[in-house]
Amino acid sequence: MVNKFLKNYLFEKFREFGSYLILIFLVLLSIIVISYHENFKKNQINSLERILDNTYFQKTLLSISKTLNPRFEKIVYLIESGESFETILNKLEIQKVEKKAILDHIINEKIKFNIYENQKITFEIDNLTKKKIKKIIIPINKKKDLIFTNNENNSYDTKILTKELRLISVYKENLIKNSLYASAIDKNINPNIIIQFAQIYGFEVDFQRDIRKNDSFQIVFEEYKNDENKTIDFGNIVYANLILKGRSLELYYFNSDKEKINDHFDPSGQSIKKTLMKTPINGARLSSSYGMRKHPILGYNKMHQGTDFAAPLGTPIMASGSGVVIKAGWCGGGGNCVKIKHNKTYSTVYAHMSKFAKGIKKGVRVAQGQIIGFVGSTGMSTGPHLHYEVIRNGKKINSQTLKLPSGKKLTGELREDFELAKIKIDVLKSELIDKQN
């Protein structure tokens, strides 16, 4: 009887607390299973680590990996001097049938492009079976690429890809301590911009004699940047200010497609360009002026009918004005020289050159500021320098004291357009200066 009562009592209690007991059991069972799994997992990881740390396994894995080539490969090929496109394809070791398909496509489609030393051509290769070119990218210029794409049937499509570039404006300024060039480089201004800046002022300023310590400059110029924020190219100098002895020489860029104007003007709308540049070479020292002097080689007094500028060998020489080359060759004591006829009144001579610039020959028309040759010491010369002559109405004159008429003066509607452009440039300059502060 007691046993029956006890059984009934336990049964009732189990019914009352059974769900809790089952829950406790499941929790304990879960803890045991998880603990076992974690120990098993830990043992597995330790075993795997021992295998990976095994020296022989590592050597085997390294040996296998060395024999495997990636399916897709990108080759950036740097062109060497004298190479042709065909010789480059030969170096890629592609199949003859594929090489022929590329060359035939170029010939049949009459595709023209230039390759030159240090140019980079990109090849995208598929190594699934044998080397197969999927794409070829040839830079045409800084803004365009020529792209060959291989179709499934081993034929090619060609297109020109124009790169998306952002145009931004940059403001720089600095004091001139030694030279304009050094002060500009100190502000990370690209040499191309420095040369452009010097050419703009070349009609008014002699950079060796007119600039003094603590003079200064301000400049706003354009840069083209790609998607990687790298500078690809440069645009115009939209604003320039050269402050010499406290006097500002401000210049604003202004263009008019209708009137074919593309020039820099002072605040009054006067172009800085003159008939001839004051100095046709940058970074030079006046070594001998126009006038009587003792000839350094002949040893007697002789009229020096030009101006000598001492400069390092190879320094570029510019045409001081637009005109036609009437001689590019040997000029006796003048060595290699170029003669340019600018108009009915003026001609100029550039002597002792080491060599002529590409394309400079008799009959060629040159633009003001265009490089026509390089400083040398040919002919009767004691060292590298440029002998520069200005001839007016057949008579040689002193280029340094010559007063030349200025260029175009904006008037009427053009002057109004220029004033509007000037205001926009001043606002842009102020915004760029504010960003720096």
Image: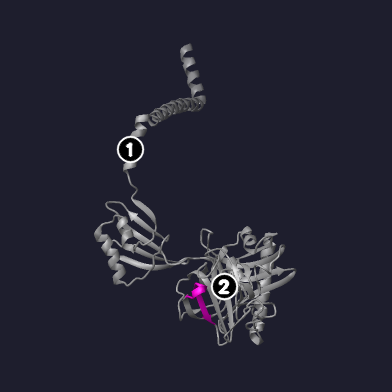
The residue tagged with tag 2: helix, strand or loop?
strand
Q: Is residue 45 above or below residue 159?
A: above
The residue tagged with tag 1: helix, strand or loop?
helix
Left or right of residue 68: residue 162: right
Magenta run includes residue 384? no
Left or right of residue 56: residue 298: right
Foreground: disc 1 or disc 2: 2
Residues rendered magenta in the picture: 330-341
Residue 89 point in image, percent of width and height: 31, 59
**Residue 358 quadrant:** bottom left
Q: Which residue is mark 2?
A: 387
Tag 2: amino acid: His
**Residue 322 quadrant:** bottom right
- Residue closest to the far front: 300
**Distance between mark 1 and mark 2 Cα atoms:** 68 Å
Magenta run includes residue 338? yes
Please state which of residues 133 and 22 is positioned toward the viewer in this rendering. 133
Structural crowding at the residue carrying mark 1, measured as other residues with C-alpha within 10 Å and reported as few (<14), some (14–19) or many (≥20): few
Residue plotted at (57% across, 62% down): 190
Residue plotted at (58% across, 73% down): 280
* Quadrant assignment for the C terminus: bottom right
Tag 1: amino acid: Ser
Q: Are marks 1 and 2 in contact (CB under 8 Å)?
A: no
Left or right of residue 306: residue 246: right
Q: Which residue is mark 1?
A: 63
Please state which of residues 163 and 120 is positioned toward the viewer in this rendering. 120
Residue 153 point in image, percent of width and height: 26, 62
